[in-house]
Image (spheres, rainbow, N blue to C red):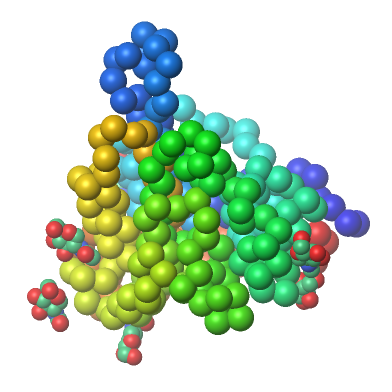
């Protein structure tokens, strides 16, 4: 089998929460104003593996105040191909990111040359006058030396705080507008989810009020990575997904990987 068309929900490894904030009531009145956009991309937020357990507040503040999509489809259940689809609006067979490795075009030089210059943030920035902000996990292999390292800042982003490579909460490197910033494991300085939140709040303070903005905040959370209590901070009472469900979800990924 070459392609899988429909993916059962347990295979979907992240969901997207999109919140459109209307600048003011003029937008409601239908006057032509460009809305501010906040896109929050999470990782492993999957009901069947318990991903919603640590996100009670999120559910209350965003989910219950908005819309839940109970029947959702993605172009690929694999992390990097799916992220590339979000950025380009294309199916994997058109953007050519086929797995989570550089050889599979995840953040590869070929991706940078052929796709990255036409992602939607580029369009928002160049053609719609948006200020653009990115914080968090980009494509799984982002920052690899073979792909330009963390000095590579993809086009389309005015402010760039991207995690080098794949999900981590501690002991990671961020690309801060192309400069490496190393983090250790002190909760109050380094816990990634809070660093992303703090940088996002900073952006809201220093952005211009005269242009619309687009923010993409891409958390590795709530993906279960580190179960050692010592590194669990007060905001991270991380209840990991039950192991059997996790295993099943990961086997699902491997299966999809082999067949796509
Ligand atoms: C989440 O909410 C449920 C139902 O209100 C509650 O039973 C549970 O303890 C909460 N979990 C956390 C982590 O706060
Ligand atoms: C990677 O992307 C390039 C450019 O689109 C394409 O030519 C190449 O075949 C892709 N590699 C794989 C393994 O699909
Ligand atoms: C990813 O795709 C490349 C190109 O087809 C292949 O060489 C590599 O083995 C794949 N890696 C995995 C982990 O599937
Ligand atoms: C972070 O790095 C330190 C020093 O190498 C190590 O002792 C610690 O276990 C690491 N913490 C995590 C969460 O990986
Ligand atoms: C962690 O960072 C805080 C704030 O900078 C500091 O007060 C504290 O001493 C640090 N803890 C450790 C163990 O280094
Ligand atoms: C985030 O900001 C708050 C408030 O300034 C601070 O207490 C906290 O230590 C910061 N966390 C990180 C990880 O930077």
Left or right of 118 in this view: 128: left
Taking the image as drawn, is residue 50 in sight?
no
Q: Position of residue 217 (x, y in %)?
A: 40, 51
Q: Can you say which quadrant of the picture contains the N terminus?
A: bottom right
Residue lying at 46% horizontally and 27% vertically, measured from the top left: 67
Count the marks: how many? 0
**Residue 202 x, y percent position in the rendering:** 22, 52
The image shows residue 103 at horizontal and vertical percentages of 72, 74
Residue at the location (46% across, 73% down)?
151
Image quarter hosting the C terminus = bottom right
| Quarter of the render that holds ligand 4 | bottom left
Which of 124 and 238 lies nearest the eye of the viewer?
A: 124
Q: Please name whichever residue, 62 or 197, is drawn nearer the observer in this view of the structure.
A: 197
Nearer to us in this view, 107 or 151 = 151
Residue at left offset 67%, top offset 62%:
113
Residue lying farthest to the top in this orientation: 29
Q: In the rendered view, would you say 102 is above or below 39?
A: below
Classify residue 159 by image quadrant: bottom left
Identify the residue shown where x is 51% and y is 77%.
149
- Res 23 quadrant in image: top left
Instruction: Note whether 193 is above or below 230 in the view shown.
Output: above
Relative to 143, say whether 131 is above or below.
Answer: above
**In this view of the protein, can residue 139 be seen by the observer?**
yes
Q: Is residue 84 left or right of residue 180?
A: right
């Amino acid at each position: 089998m070459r392609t899988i068309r429909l993916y059962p929900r347990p295979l979907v490894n992240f969901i997207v929460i999109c919140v459109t904030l209307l600048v003011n009531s003029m937008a409601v009145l239908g006057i032509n104003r460009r809305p501010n956009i906040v896109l929050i991309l999470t990782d492993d937020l999957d009901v069947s593996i318990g991903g919603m357990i640590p996100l009670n507040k999120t559910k209350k503040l965003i989910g219950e105040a908005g819309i839940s999509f109970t029947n959702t489809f993605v172009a690929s259940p694999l992390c990097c191909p799916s992220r590339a689809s979000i950025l380009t609006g294309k199916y994997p067979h058109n953007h050519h990111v086929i797995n989570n490795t550089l050889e599979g075009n995840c953040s590869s030089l070929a991706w940078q040359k052929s796709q990255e210059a036409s992602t939607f943030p580029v369009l928002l920035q160049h053609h719609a006058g948006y200020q653009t902000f990115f914080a968090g996990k980009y494509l799984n292999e982002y920052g690899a030396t073979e792909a330009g390292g963390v000095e590579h800042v993809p086009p389309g982003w005015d402010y760039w705080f991207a995690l080098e490579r794949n999900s981590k909460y501690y002991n990671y490197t961020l690309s801060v507008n192309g400069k490496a910033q190393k983090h250790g494991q002190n909760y109050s300085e380094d816990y990634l989810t809070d660093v992303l939140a703090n940088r996002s709040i900073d952006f809201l303070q220093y952005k211009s009020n005269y242009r619309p903005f687009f923010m993409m905040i891409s958390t590795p959370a709530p993906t279960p990575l580190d179960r050692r209590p010592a590194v669990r901070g007060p905001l991270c009472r991380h209840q990991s997904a039950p192991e059997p469900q996790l295993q099943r979800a990961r086997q699902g990924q491997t299966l999809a990987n082999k067949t796509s």
